[in-house]
Amino acid sequence: MELLDPTVEQPAQAIDFAPRPKALAGKRVALIENTKHNSDKLLEKIGDILKKEQGIAEWKIFHKHNSSVPAHKEVIDEVKAGYDVMVAGVGD
């Protein structure tokens, strides 16, 4: 009997993360929710905490079309043009 291993070893990939600000005070924060249950409530709470404890200037929630796709181009363009930091949140 011959056993076949269907898995393929994945090559290691380096991930380049976006630069992080040293502080959040005065920053505009985009909160992107994935449409799952309670993700908007979680992000609203995070936005309020960031405003109170970190002194962010403002926050706004953006909505994806659904949880299984990336944010649509209009959201990405608005976030890139008008916000300093982005937080993606999930719910359930």
Image (cartoon, rainbow, N blue to C red):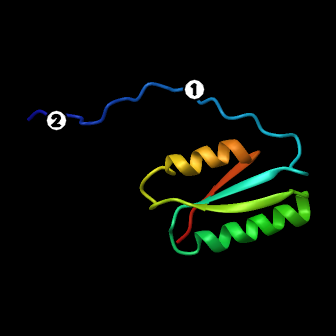
Percent coordinates x, y for residue 21 in the rendering: 83, 40
* Residue at point 91%, 58% (across, down): 55
**Which residue in the protein does label 1 denote?**
14
Alpha carbon distance from label 1 to label 2: 33 Å
Percent coordinates x, y for residue 62 in the rendering: 61, 60
* Residue at point 53%, 62% (across, down): 34
- Count of labels shown? 2
Q: Quadrant of the N terminus?
A: top left
* Residue at point 66%, 48% (across, down): 79
Mark 1 vs 2, N-terminal side: 2
Residue located farthest toward the left when viewing the structure as drawn: 1
Neighbours of disc 2 within 10 Å: few (<14), some (14-19), many (20+): few
Tell me which amino acid carries mark 2. Answer: Leu
Tell me which amino acid carries mark 1. Answer: Ala
**Which residue in the protein does label 2 denote?**
3
Quarter where residue 58 is shown: bottom right
Percent coordinates x, y for residue 92 in the rendering: 52, 72
Q: Is residue 11 above or below residue 91?
A: above
* Residue at point 51%, 46% (across, down): 73
Helix, strand or loop at label 2? It is loop
